[in-house]
Amino acid sequence: MSNYSYTTDFFSFIKEHLNDDIHTLLLKKNKNFPFDYTFAVEQIEIRKKIKLKLPNWYKNFRLIFPSKLSYEQASSEITAQYKQRLLHGNSVCDLTGGLGIDSFYLSQVAQRAIYVEINQDYCEAAIHNFSELEASSVQIVHDNCEHYIDSTNCFSDTYYIDPARRGNENRRLYALSDCEPDILKLKNKILTKGKRLIIKASPMLDIHASLLALGDVTQVHILSVRNECKELLFVIDKTSSDKNTQLVCVNFSTSGKEQIYTAGFKEEKENIPVISGEVHRFLYEPNASILKAGLFKSISAQYRIGKLHINSHLYTSDEMIGYFPGRIFEITESFDFSKKNMVSVARKYPQANVSVRNFPLSADTLRGKMRIKEGGDIYLFATTLFPDNKKLIIGKKITD
């Protein structure tokens, strides 16, 4: 792509054929269309995949997606909007602009925004898209982010960076030092040009190892969408004197509710969970962000709920804690794990949603042994109670 001077015919074609089969469309590529036909079909293919991730950009048929990789690596709109809360000051610089989702939403709460990107096609797409979105406060800079930091005299209150997590042959990378650019080498330079640095990282990253590598991290935001962990955000703030790193666990649930649970590393280390040797009326499963953060002790203390086992990460109580950040189940019955009970449970519940926590069998293996179908309204948890009591717990979900 050399430019984004596309005609009304180009955008009309995308809108008119959005629901068409991609392979059928590609067979027509020899026809004499007055625009880049292959690229138009690629836009349709991308749009088919972004409806949930980028709903507002999906609705705008004048926006351009420079490559499939650009949308795959982009933040979702809901996580980009969340990052608006993390911006301090009036100016922000996105050092790895990409598709521009984060730059766009950050620019909505900043007086001045800078988008830095090494890929020229992405820069051209950003110029076009920001114009269509009337994001006039965003300055586009075609440059390597490392060179930009070395050469710029411009100070930004907040810097945001999303190091590329793919290596040779599209191999996924998870350690910060393996990503491009190497933020461990770059962060000190960035902080000479700004007060705050936000680093987006893979949800597969080891949080504890990353904190040791980065040094003085003020906050870690663990973002999940529909209970699937999507992003880790490490915030380094030069103006903060608090050495107790805060872990902020956020889940945007299926119902649209936002669950937030926050605890410090200090509290997590100091808290002693109440270990329950039995299952009470209600069972609690923390959301994916809390599980990723490893806040297993503080959540027991804060909500005053018993933990089934130090390694099971399921909790129980007689009275329902309706604001618990995760799924809540009302228990109907429980059984000791045995061949006899497996047969009787399977006979009574031929279909159930099977989960295992701290249990010697996987969910698939257990389901196969019991010969029950997955799904329905019944939930079966196979887990271990203190001290070493294997259990099959049956319940119905109250809320997620």
Image (spheres, rainbow, N blue to C red):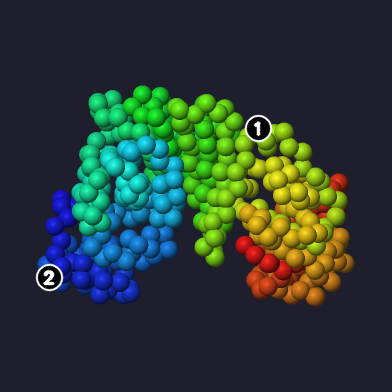
Residue 380 in the figure: left or right of residue 79? right
Count of marks, rendered view: 2
Q: Which residue is pictured at 26% across the width and 53% down the height? A: 66
Mark 1 touching mark 2, by CB under 8 A?
no
Tell me residue 185's x, y (percent).
Answer: 41, 25
Q: Is residue 180 visible?
A: no
Q: Secondary structure at mark 1?
A: helix
Please give the label number shown on residue 32.
2
Q: What amino acid is labelled 2 in the image?
A: Asn
Residue 312 in the figure: left or right of residue 3? right
Instruction: State the image quarter where residue 342 is shown.
Output: bottom right
Instruction: State the image quarter where residue 399 is shown.
Output: bottom right
Q: Residues within 10 Å of mark 1 (few under 14, many from 20)?
A: few
Decide which of tag 1 and tag 2 comes sooner along the chain.
Answer: 2
Q: Which residue is pictured at 38% across the width and 50% down the height? A: 74
Tell me residue 302's x, y (percent).
Answer: 70, 45
Tell me residue 154's x, y (percent).
Answer: 26, 30
Q: For marks 1 and 2, give the one nearer the viewer.
A: 1
Q: Residues within 10 Å of mark 2 (few under 14, many from 20)?
A: few
Please give the label number shown on residue 141.
none
Q: What amino acid is labelled 1 in the image?
A: Lys
Q: CA distance from mark 1 to mark 2?
A: 66 Å
Q: Decide which of 112, 43 is in the foreground and name it.
A: 112
Give the residue number, with chain letter if any, for mark 1.
266
